[in-house]
Amino acid sequence: MSELFAVWIAAILTLMVYSYLFADNPLYRLAQHLFVGSSVGYSAVVVIHNVLRPRLVEPLLDDATGNWPYVLPLLLGLLLLTKARGTTAWLGNSSVAFLFGVGAALAIGGALIGSLLPQIQASWVSVLPNTAGGAGAAVNNILLTVGTIGTLSYFYFTMGARKGPGSGLLRFGSTVGRWVLLITFGAIFGNRVMAYVSLLIERVHFLLGDWLGLVG
């Protein structure tokens, strides 16, 4: 009975969401509010049980004298709550500044170490036919090198209007980079559409199979 009840709830919510295809209506907004509310409630429970309690409350309640630095994040968190009132919002500026500073540092460090440097290392490939993988790997490496250089040339705007040695080669590389970008964006868009179509097929199969029992 519990499984049947869950299937009916899921089917009704799915139809409520799909009702937006006809027009914005109260059923769709109700499903939207339920989704947002349940997501926020689940996130709050996860934060309390997996972050606050084991990493803040329990160390503060411990008798060990080395846990006093945990008072600092507690104070920053309490100051952040003062942003709810306009008269005391200035007290939380330090917490917001700390969050933005740490977030920016992590984002920049993650972009450099996790994205930029690995992409630079992956671009240093051999284009010789005797590389590992044979001639096919060499052709792939040549395409990768030409695409990378062409894409970088496309965004080199300072030499676009100048004439002189290398300007024609730069314009040719810019044209190649433009086509590489168009092909890449088209492939990404196609993959996204395929993913959405797969989700639609899964939902339709759920409605016709698990809910109505019309398909096996």
Image: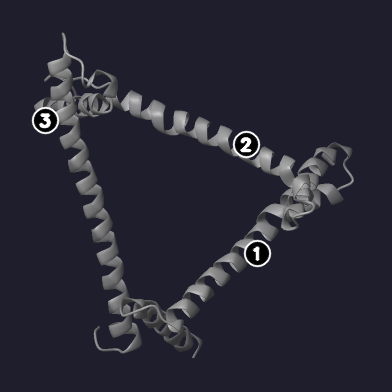
| Image disc number at residue 74 | none
Mark 1 falls on what kind of element?
helix
CA gap, disc 1 to disc 3? 52 Å
Amino acid type at mark 1: Val
Please say which color scheme the image uses.
one colour
In the rendered structure, which disc, 2 or 3, sits on the residue that comes first in sequence?
Answer: 2
Question: What is the x, y in percent for residue 66?
Answer: 85, 37
Residue matched to label 1? 45
Residue contact at pointers 2 and 1, CB within 8 angstroms = no
Tell me the residue that label 2 is attached to.
102
Within the image, what quadrant is residue 144 found in? top left
Question: To which quarter of the image does residue 171 belong?
Answer: top left
Q: Amino acid at mark 3?
A: Gly
At horizontal 28% and vertical 56% (from top left) the residue drawn is 192
As helix, strand or loop, the secondary structure at mark 2 comes to: helix
Determine which residue is flagged by label 3.
136
- Please identify the quarter of the rendering in which residue 215 is found: bottom left
Q: Nearer the viewer, mark 1 or mark 3?
A: 1
Give the CA distance from mark 2 to mark 1. Answer: 24 Å
Which amino acid is tagged 2?
Val
Residue found at x 73% / y 53%: 83
